[in-house]
Structure formats: structure tokens, C-alpha cells
Image: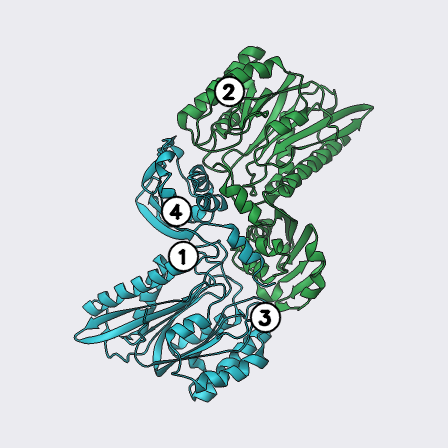
Chain colours: A green, B cyan
Amino acid sequence: MEIASPKGFLYSVAKAEIRYTNRYDIALIYSKKVAAVAGVFTTNQIKAAPVKICMKRIKNNTAQAIVLNSGNANACTGKKGVEDALKITELIAEKLNIHKEYILPLSTGVIGVPMPMDRILPALNILVENLGKATPFDVAQAIMTTDKFPKITYRQIEIQNRVSTITGICKGAGMISPNLATMLCVILTDAKINVDLMKKMLQNSIQDSFNSITVDGDMSTNDTVIMLANGESLIEIERGDSSYKKFNEALNELCNELAHLIVKDAEGATKFIKISVKNAKNSSDAKKVAKAVANSLLVKTALYGEDPNWGRVVAAVGYSGVPVKEEKIELYINGVCLFDKGVPTMKEEELRESIKNKEIEILINLNVGKAEKTIFTSDLSEEYVRINSAYRT
Amino acid sequence: MEIASPKGFLYSVAKAEIRYTNRYDIALIYSKKVAAVAGVFTTNQIKAAPVKICMKRIKNNTAQAIVLNSGNANACTGKKGVEDALKITELIAEKLNIHKEYILPLSTGVIGVPMPMDRILPALNILVENLGKATPFDVAQAIMTTDKFPKITYRQIEIQNRVSTITGICKGAGMISPNLATMLCVILTDAKINVDLMKKMLQNSIQDSFNSITVDGDMSTNDTVIMLANGESLIEIERGDSSYKKFNEALNELCNELAHLIVKDAEGATKFIKISVKNAKNSSDAKKVAKAVANSLLVKTALYGEDPNWGRVVAAVGYSGVPVKEEKIELYINGVCLFDKGVPTMKEEELRESIKNKEIEILINLNVGKAEKTIFTSDLSEEYVRINSAYRT
């Protein structure tokens, strides 16, 4: 797939051998014009050094470059971690001759190991020298950790014969839980958007995409979504306008697509599972129930084993912490009703074929209200354990 | 190990072929005298039929028999499930010629499948006929599901030349989370105890034992602890008395031993992990942090891989929902400080040998208060996934 880039953005990648040898592991994204910036970050209280810096800097509402690396998360690295991340952005600012406050650092990889600055600093020269020689796809590859494939997509909208592009680059494969994940995501657009409007749009888009996926319930120290809009397409997005609707839809689609790619690349996953909770009292309840089911190891392993062991789903609903009534609950898997208002239907046989599908749909009807929520997750295989027990050693 | 039985209790087992063939899968425990009874049950809102019945019946404060089965949990089975469990206890009451309200049903096994009453009813005759022919150990074997070994122990206390025995029989291997698990536990004693005192002692004993273990964070529909005291030893336990102290200690020890056996038999587990949280603001915070670490798949898989990837522990502390300060946290694994008030110590090398131990100790010092809590858990192996993806099929 050819990935379009929004106008006015340049890319470069380099090999800093941060953790991996002989692969690109550091990348730079640069906007020729200063851009409006919005960001969403992990709610984990232990935040990586680059996250702390980004959270401060996006308060300027303006940014111009993003420096990303894989192999080291620069998390749990104390004061030195912050100094290292600051130094990286300072050196790039000097070389690019832009304000250091306009440079955002993003890191992913192992936690608790100081950044190998002796190898990173020389790579920064290469990044600046080579700006324009790489593509967004190269950046997506450079930020992979346990990802099996790079995650990138784009959307284009046309308004009055002009085209504006939104390109999304992200990484993430394990440790993905609602409220972000070990995921980095950069969304670049050449549309012109007021920064407050962009913040709202990004927050909304994230709710049903990155905040609605879970792989293992673990939440990372580094999760970051950064959006830059540099206005180079000359298309202006204004609230209430038709441009707004088009752009918003495109942004939602883009975020959903990237979030689903993360679930599909979940470590060792063999299935993509959609869990919908309907008729809950409120959406927070609906989310809690969906999340309890999505994070149940017994549900995940049963689906991996292609066993329609729906009792485990009902058990997870029961311990979700949400008030439920057994005699009101209906449970469907792939459209087959297995539990009908508290009574088992004994229809598991009807699932024999469809339980083997790559995509599984679980629908839980609580029948106590009108709220609903959908969460996307993966199954759990021996491969997940293999990958995560050997990630460092 | 020879298991002593408290005086005045009789046991029998039978083969009802509920799920397994050619093994004992149903058991009866009978006290010659009516006994004082106390019970603790799952907090899962979806409760199995036998749990609903036990919860009502122990309000009588008196019981005389317990009928237990493996292979079928009789959960999510609607009204018929309750009718089936009631019928089982009625038939036994008739044959034993005791009050049906004094019979407690306990079930464990697969969820959502009606009890095979055509095979269970004939087995009940055998149970009553054979009373006295089985041992507590036989009962422990009959209630095993994915357990690799029967779980049983006893304690004896001596008071004024008389001996009183407490015998504990339990099952549980997966789906074990604080606030009980797929675990059944029966505690029998020939001491004489006031029922209110016994309830308090049991509640206390459970806090640091069965409510302090977690395997996969899933909480079952069937968890039950039942304690019977029939007074046959003529030793009376009275509050404030030295007998109270002795008995209480013995009961705590017994519950701890059984709880640890469950963790050691966790499906596919290779390690027994003790997670202590110290100097938390309050004990609820301490428990939340310990539980977040204990249930983190990334922590569990890292320990399985014998990788001292302590950053995953700190990340779990950060997302536990408890307010923490990175710059105050200290983390020790097997006595080695790895994170010292927000700074990595780079001492992982010192763990190279001890990380291979079968027992691992993680100590998290939050340094914000004085409360503490210890949770016991297991690691997560490919074997867990294999067992749980194939449990039914």
C-alpha cells in the first residue's frame, strides 16, 4: 500500500543500535511550518521521561518536530532519563534551528534501562542530515518493538477541489489496555485546524478506538498519541462546517483502523474479538462489563481453544463489579443465543463451525438500561507467553 | 501423610460419571451430631445454584451433612439448577433421616450445563450406604477438577489432656482471585464453638489465606468455604480463653497452608510468588497495588521466563489506581533493590541465580504510609494456556 504523506512533512530514520542491531530504531518527523499540536497520554501514574516532557510541551499548542525511538522506553530512569530526553531534543533543535520546546520525544521499548546516549547522539546528526529521505512507512518500521508488521494508514478528504491528507503511524502489540497501551501513535495532517477544536476531535476519536482495545490489561508507562496539523493544504476545518464532518469521519476511521491493527497484531493472537455490551444502566457500566470479559484469561484461552465455553463469559460479567441480574442477562456468540435470561439454551452445537472464525463477536445484553459499549480484544495463546517470557533475555 | 479426622464425622464417595468416567466425583460428609456452621461465599454476582442454597441454609446456624461433586458447577443453569440441587439434598435427607435444611450442596466443574440427574440420583444411594467407608483424603480426591493433587491438611490442639482436630479439605487450581476462587473448602472440627465466634474466626482466617491468593484474576461462581463444628471432642473454645488462642492459630495455619497449596497447584505454574506491599496509605491501597502486580500478565510471564524485568512491576504499580509517587517507590526482588526511590540501581545481575528459585519474593515499598498487605500468586506459563484452552473440549 502506498502511503500518502500530508504536505509539508519530512521524515528520516537512522540506526542507533539502542537495543536491536542493524535496523532502523530512531526516527524524526519534521514539519516545515510550525503546527498546531494535540496529545493524549497514558493514565499510568508512572510516566516515562518523554511522556512527562511531551505533556508539558504540548501546552504551547505548537510543535514542529517529533523524535521517536524503539528499543528503550526511557521509563523508570529517574532524573537522568528526563535529562537524556531533554538533551536529545535540544541537539535536534540546534541542528534544525527551531525552538527546542517545539520538539516532542516519544520512546518505546524496555523499561528501567538508561538510554544509550553514546549511540543515540551520533544518530541524531544522521536524522537531521537525512530529513526528507525516508517515508512515513520507514518511520512506522523504525518504531516497531514486538510488532509483527508496521502500522500505518491514511485518509484523504476533498474540499473545493483541494485535498487534505491525514496520515497515522503507530506501534503496539502487547500490553494494550483501554486508556491506551504500549502504543505510540502520530497523526499528521496538512489541514488547518484550530488547536482547541483539534484537541476535542482527537479526544473523541480516541474513545472508540485506542481506548476501546485491550490485549492483556496491562497499561504502559509510555502511551502517547500526538497529532500535528500544519495547515499546508490550505483547507481549513471549522466547526459546524461540512469540512468538519468530513475531517472528523476520516479521523475516526483512521484511529479505528490503527487500533484494530494493534489488536490483530496482539502478541500471539489468533483471533480478533469484538465484545459488545448492550442495555447497561450507563456507559461506564457497559465498559466495565466489556472490559472484565475482554481481560478474562479464561475467556481468552477458551476462544483460543475454539471452545464456546460461554459460562466463563457469564462469570466475568458477574465479577465485573457492575450490578447485574442473572435472570435478565442474554448472551450471544456469533449470533447464537447461549444464555437466555438466566437459562442455558444448550445451542452450543450451532457454534461448532463459526467458533473457528478469525473474528468472533460476543454480545451481552444486560437488559437493565439503554447504554452500550464495544471493546476489541484478542485471544490468548501459548505464543503470548513465549513472547513475553523471552522479551528481554 | 496420614490425615486425622475430627471425631464424629463420617465420609463416603461414589462414581456418578458426572463428567469424568471411572473416578470418584461425588462425596458425602456427615456429622453424627448436628454441628454449628459458618460459611463464606463468592462475591461474584452470578452465583451457582448450590451457593444460593448454602447461603440460605447456613442462616440456621446448624448443619449436619455436606454433599459435594466435581465435573459440574451447577452454575448458570436457571431454575432447574436450583431444583436439581434441592432434590439432591432432599433425597439424602430422606435416606439419612435428618432435616433437609441441614444438608449443604457444593459443586465445582463446568458452568452452564444441567446436572446429569439420571446418573447422580443412583449415586446418592451408594453415598449413604457407604458412609464411614471413605476417608477425608478420598473426599479431597473426589472434588478435584484440574487439580494435579488433592489438597488436605489438619491441625490438632491439646487442652487439658484432650485433643481436638481441625481437618481442611479443599480444591482449586485455576481461576483463583482474591475474594475466593473456583475453590471449595470444607473445614471440619470436633471442637465445640459458639456459632458467632466461629463465624468471626473463619472470616479472619480467610482474609490472609484464601482472600490473599490470585492465579488469573478470574473469580468463580461457586467459591465456598464451609466450616462445621460438632463438639464431639468435648473441648470448648471460648473467647479470651487460652483454648481460643490455640484454636485460632491452628485455624489460621490450616487456611494458609491450604491457600498456598492452591497457588502451588495453579494451572501450569512453575513458581510461587509472594508480593508484599509496605508503607501504603491504607490496607485497601496496599491490596490494590499487590493485586495489580499479581495479576499483571507481563509480570507473570517475565517471572516464568526467569527474567528480572522489574519495570513491568513498577508499571503495574502505576496503573493500580492507587496514588503513588515514583520518586518514593522502592522495589526489591528476592532481597535485591532494583528501583531505589525512582532510580534504577542496575543490580539485576545480582538476581541471576535467585530468579531461578521456585519461590520468588517481590517487595514494593510505597513510602507514603504504614499499611501493608501480602498476596500470593503464581507465574504464567504456556501450560496454563494449554490447560484452559482445552478444559472442556
Work out how far the residue at label 4 is from the one at label 2, CA to CA, in angstroms.
40 Å
Amino acid at circle 4: Asp
Label 3 SS: loop
Work out how far the residue at label 1 is from the one at label 2, CA to CA, in angstroms.
45 Å
Instruction: Point out residue A343 in the picture as x, y percentages from the top left corner.
Output: 63, 69
Label 1–label 4 contact, CB within 8 A: no
Work out how far the residue at label 4 is from the one at label 3, CA to CA, in angstroms.
37 Å
Chain of the residue under the numbered disc 1 shown in the image: B
Label 2 SS: helix
Instruction: Point out residue B340 in the picture as x, y percentages from the top left corner.
Output: 34, 33
Residue under numbered circle 3: B77
- Residue A217 showing in the rendered view: no
**Pointer 4 local density, CA inside 10 Å: few below 14, some 14–19, many at least 20:** many
Instruction: Compare marks 4 and 3 and give the one earlier in the sequence.
Output: 3
Residue under numbered circle 4: B285
Q: Nearer the viewer, mark 3 or mark 2?
A: 2
Residue under numbered circle 2: A120
Nearest the eye: A244 or A21: A21
Q: Are marks 4 and 2 on the same chain?
A: no
Q: Is residue B204 left or right of residue B73?
A: left
Chain of the residue under the numbered disc 4 shown in the image: B
Q: Are marks 3 and 2 on the same chain?
A: no
Q: Are marks 4 and 3 on the same chain?
A: yes
Q: Nearer the viewer, mark 4 or mark 2?
A: 2
